[in-house]
Image (cartoon, helix red, strand yellow):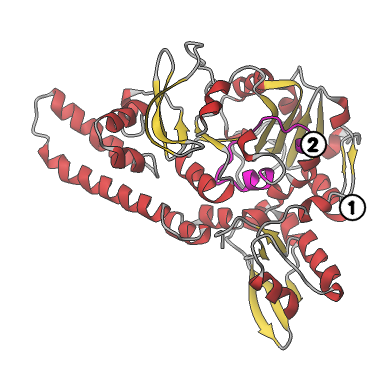
C-alpha cells in the first residue's frame, strides 16, 4: 500500500484521518506489512493490502484486532497466512476454546487441530507466493465452477461490457475506484489506461485481492472491505467509480448508493455494469431489483440506462457506444441485465466510435484464448471452443454467439504469439487483417504475464 493512499481515507465511525503506525516490511514505494490507525481502531496491512474490517470479537480469526496482535507479538507468518480462504471452522474451534476457557474446562485437545489448520493456511500461502500461473493457482485453490469462471473471465460477455466505457474512464482518471474487483480482471484492463497509482482495488475477499495484486494491477492500491458498510473513503475521493457484476450481491444497496454520491467528485463518472433485473431470470440472481428501482437509488446523478445485450452488440458489431440513445421501457424491462452510466458532465453522456481500437490498444501479453483447444493441421492451428462449466454460457449467451465454435489460425500468427517478446506482436502484412479480426472477436486476448 502506498503511504499517500492514506490521505484519501477517513474513518466512517470517528471521522478521523488514518495514520501510519508500525511498519514491519516496506519497499521504496509501498508498505508491505504494517499497522494503520484512526482514533477508534487499528487495521493491518498484510502483503500490501489494507484490511479494513471491524475488530469484532466473534470474528476472532479474521478480525483485524487479532491480526494486529499477531503482528505485534512477532508472529508475522501467522498474520500473513490467516486472511486467506475460509475461516469458518477455525472460528468455530476458537469459539469452543473460549467457551471452555470461560467455564474453566480442559482445552488442550483443541490445540492440535488449531495447529493443523494454521499449517494448512501456511501451505496455501506458500502456493500463492510461488511462481505458478493464475490458471495453475485456480486449479489448486478453486477446483470448481467459480475457479473456471475466473480462469475464463476475459471471455465473458459481462466482462466485455467494460470495453465500451474505457474512453470515459480515460477522461476521468484522476482517481478510480474498482469496487468488487474480485481477482482483478477489470483492474488489469483499467491499469493500461490510467496510472496504476490512481487505481484503488477493493473487495471483501482477501485472497482475490492478493491474486489481483500479484497478477493483474501490481502498482494499484488495495483495500479489503465490506461494501455493505460505510466505506472509509473521504468525500469527493474519486473521479470515477466502477462496479461490475456486484451490486446485486450487496444487501445494503441504498447505503452503498449514497456512498457513491458522497465519494464521487462533481462531474465524475459512475459506472454500474451488469445489474441483474428482477423482472427476468438470471442464473445467479442475487438480490436483483427492477430497472426502475436501480435508477431510484441514484436520484442526484444524471444517468443513462442501457440493456446489456444491445450495449455489447453495438460494441462487438459496430464498435460504438451511444449514450444519447433512449431505449423503450419494454426493451429495458425485458433485459436480464442492465448497465447504468451516471455523471453531471454532459460531455460524457455522448456517442463514442472506433472502440475496436481500445481492444487492440496497449496490448501487453496477447495469447490465443485458452477457452479453445488447439490442434495443428498442416500450416494451420485448428481451434475448437470448449465449455468451461455447465453455467458459463448460460450466464454469457453472447459469448457463445461471438466466440466461433471453430476457427483456423495461420501457423505464422500462432508462432508470433508463442515467440513474442512481452508487449510485442509482429506478423506479416498478409496476416495482419486476420490477426485484427482475432483480436476484435476475442480469439486473441490480452492477459497479464504468467496468467496462462
Mark 1 falls on what kind of element? Answer: helix
Residue 24, given in percent of the width and then of the height, sits at 35, 34
Mark 2 falls on what kind of element? Answer: helix
367 lies above or below 36: below
Mark 1 neighbour density, 10 Å: few (under 14) some (14–19) many (20 or more): few
Residue at 27% across, 45% down:
118
Instruction: Please indicate whether residue 319 sits to the left or right of residue 106 in the image.
Output: right
Mark 2 neighbour density, 10 Å: few (under 14) some (14–19) many (20 or more): some
Instruction: Please indicate whether residue 160 sits to the left or right of residue 431 in the image.
Output: left
Q: Which residue is mark 2?
A: 168
Nearer to me, 26 or 409? 26
Nearer to me, 431 or 376? 431
Magenta stretch encompasses residue 176: yes
Q: Which mark is residue 318?
A: 1
Residue at 63% across, 40% down:
196
Give the number of the mark in front: 1 or 2. Answer: 2
Quarter in which the C terminus is drawn: bottom right
Highlighted range, magenta: 169-191
Amino acid at each position: 500500500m502506498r503511504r499517500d493512499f492514506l490521505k484519501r481515507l477517513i474513518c466512517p465511525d470517528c471521522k478521523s484521518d488514518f495514520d501510519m503506525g508500525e511498519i514491519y516490511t516496506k519497499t521504496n514505494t509501498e508498505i508491505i506489512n504494517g499497522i494503520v490507525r484512526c482514533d477508534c481502531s487499528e487495521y493491518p496491512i498484510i502483503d500490501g493490502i489494507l484490511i479494513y474490517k471491524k475488530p469484532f470479537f466473534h470474528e476472532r480469526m479474521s478480525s483485524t484486532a487479532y491480526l494486529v496482535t499477531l503482528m505485534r507479538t512477532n508472529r508475522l507468518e501467522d498474520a500473513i497466512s490467516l486472511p486467506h480462504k475460509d475461516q469458518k471452522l477455525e472460528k468455530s474451534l476458537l469459539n469452543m476454546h473460549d467457551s471452555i476457557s470461560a467455564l474453566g474446562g480442559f482445552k488442550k485437545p483443541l490445540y492440535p487441530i488449531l495447529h493443523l489448520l494454521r499449517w494448512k493456511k501456511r501451505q496455501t500461502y506458500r502456493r500463492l507466493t510461488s511462481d505458478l500461473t493464475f490458471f495453475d493457482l485456480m486449479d489448486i485453490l478453486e477446483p470448481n465452477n467459480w475457479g473456471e469462471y475466473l480462469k475464463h473471465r476475459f471471455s465473458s460477455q459481462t466482462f466485455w461490457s467494460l470495453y465500451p466505457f474505457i474512453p470515459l474512464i480515460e477522461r476521468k482518471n484522476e482517481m478510480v475506484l474498482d469496487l468488487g474487483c474480485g481477482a482483478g480482471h477489470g483492474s488489469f484492463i483499467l491499469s493500461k489506461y490510467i496510472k496504476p497509482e490512481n487505481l484503488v482495488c477493493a473487495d471483501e475477499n482477501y485472497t482475490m485481492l492478493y491474486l489481483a495484486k500479484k497478477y493483474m494491477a501490481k502498482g494499484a492500491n488495495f483495500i479489503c472491505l465490506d461494501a455493505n458498510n460505510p466505506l472509509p473513503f473521504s468525500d469527493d475521493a474519486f473521479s470515477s467509480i466502477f462496479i461490475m457484476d456486484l451490486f446485486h450481491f450487496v444487501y445494503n444497496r441504498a447505503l452503498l448508493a449514497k456512498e457513491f454520491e458522497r465519494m464521487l467528485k462533481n462531474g465524475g463518472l459512475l459506472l454500474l455494469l451488469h445489474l441483474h433485473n428482477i423482472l427476468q431470470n438470471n442464473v445467479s440472481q442475487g438480490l436483483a431489483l427492477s430497472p426502475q428501482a436501480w435508477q431510484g437509488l441514484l436520484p442526484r446523478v444524471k444517468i443513462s440506462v442501457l440493456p446489456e445485450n444491445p450495449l455489447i452488440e453495438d460494441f462487438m458489431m459496430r464498435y460504438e457506444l451511444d449514450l444519447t440513445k433512449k431505449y423503450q421501457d419494454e426493451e429495458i424491462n425485458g433485459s436480464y441485465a442492465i448497465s447504468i452510466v451516471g455523471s453531471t458532465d454532459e460531455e460524457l453522456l455522448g456517442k463514442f466510435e472506433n472502440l475496436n481500437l481500445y481492444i487492440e490498444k496497449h496490448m501487453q501479453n496477447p495469447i490465443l484464448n485458452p477457452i479453445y483447444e488447439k490442434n495443428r493441421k498442416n500450416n494451420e492451428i485448428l481451434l475448437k471452443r470448449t465449455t468451461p462449466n455447465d453455467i458459463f454460457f448460460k450466464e454469457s449467451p453472447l459469448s457463445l454467439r461471438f466466440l466461433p465454435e471453430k476457427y483456423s489460425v495461420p501457423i505464422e500468427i500462432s508462432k508470433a504469439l508463442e515467440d513474442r517478446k512481452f508487449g510485442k506482436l509482429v506478423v506479416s502484412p498478409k496476416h495482419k487483417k486476420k490477426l485484427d479480426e482475432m483480436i476484435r472477436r476475442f480469439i486473441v486476448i490480452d492477459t497479464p504475464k504468467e496468467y496462462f
